[in-house]
Image (cartoon, rainbow, N blue to C red):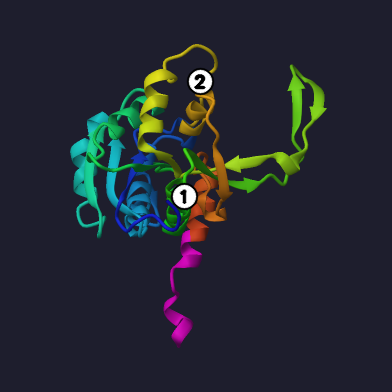
Amino acid sequence: MTGPTPAGSAAAIIVGAGRGERLGAGGPKALRSLGGVPMLVHAVRALSAASSVGHVVVAAPPADVERTQALLVGQHPGASLRVVPGGATRHESVAAALAAVPTGVTVVLVHDAARALAPGTLADAVAAAVTAGAEAVVPGLAVTDTVKQVSGDVVVATLDRTELRAVQTPQGFRRETLERAHREVSGGTGPAATDDAGLVERLGLPVVVVPGDDDAFKVTRPLDLLLAEAVLANREPRKDRDD
């Protein structure tokens, strides 16, 4: 199949069950305020607005499922919404949400609520690449810093940054590929994969990269939250612009 994903045929999983200790005290990270609105609400609005997305499943902190449902009332126009309790780890949260994706959906996006300002157009680009035949797709940005490989405190190599990408979300998958990855790989030995595409890589399947978006950065530290506030303020029309 080629061309864009049929309207409303993809499902988006939004992972928002993390505590966010690096962001400081203040409760679950996904429910922290950004421009007066919880980050999770921004993420749900953006993915619901993507033309490819017809279903959104949120993995929420188990103690905050009802609160999360209340926050998201009316915030997902054009898409169905379901909120499920997340797990103790990110992969457990994705697995719980994946089990709640409606039967018949074959393209699944997985998104971090902490990338609250990622635009819906990015979700559509990722979904289109899966629809075109990719097993797994990640958005990525070129790395601009010099990156060195170290052993202890000694540099052993300087990596060629032209071959490196900083990977973002939403990541996209054929549903059966993502289910297989969680079933066969997530509980295996070795270092834990830091994203779902890493699980697919361990299956020996190719992961395709599409251009990322500068606004899809992850809010992890207080400085990131300040940047997100600035980006959001720049998006909103100023009242005096038409004066």
- Residue lying at the far top in this picture: please name it: 189
Location of residue 8 (image quadrant): bottom left
Can residue 155 be seen in this snapshot? yes
Which amino acid, by three-letter code, is at mark 2? Ala
Q: Is residue 242 magenta?
A: yes
User: Label 1 belongs to which residue?
Assistant: 132
What residue span does the magenta drawing correspond to?
232-243
Q: Is residue 85 left or right of residue 29?
A: left
Q: Residue at x 21, y 41 (%)?
A: 67
Quarter holding the C terminus is: bottom left
> Which numbered circle lies on residue 192?
2
Can residue 89 be seen in this snapshot? no
Q: Residues within 10 Å of mark 1 (few under 14, many from 20)?
A: few
Of 21 and 50, the residue lying toward us: 50
Location of residue 207 (image quadrant): top right
Q: Is residue 79 magenta?
A: no
- Label located before the other in sequence (1 or 2): 1
Percent across and percent down for residue 190 are 54, 13
Percent across and percent down for residue 54 are 28, 53
Percent across and percent down for residue 11 are 31, 46
Q: Residues within 10 Å of mark 2 (few under 14, many from 20)?
A: few
Report helix, strand or loop for mark 1. loop
Which amino acid, by three-letter code, is at mark 1? Ala
Q: Residue at x 68, y 39 (%)?
A: 164
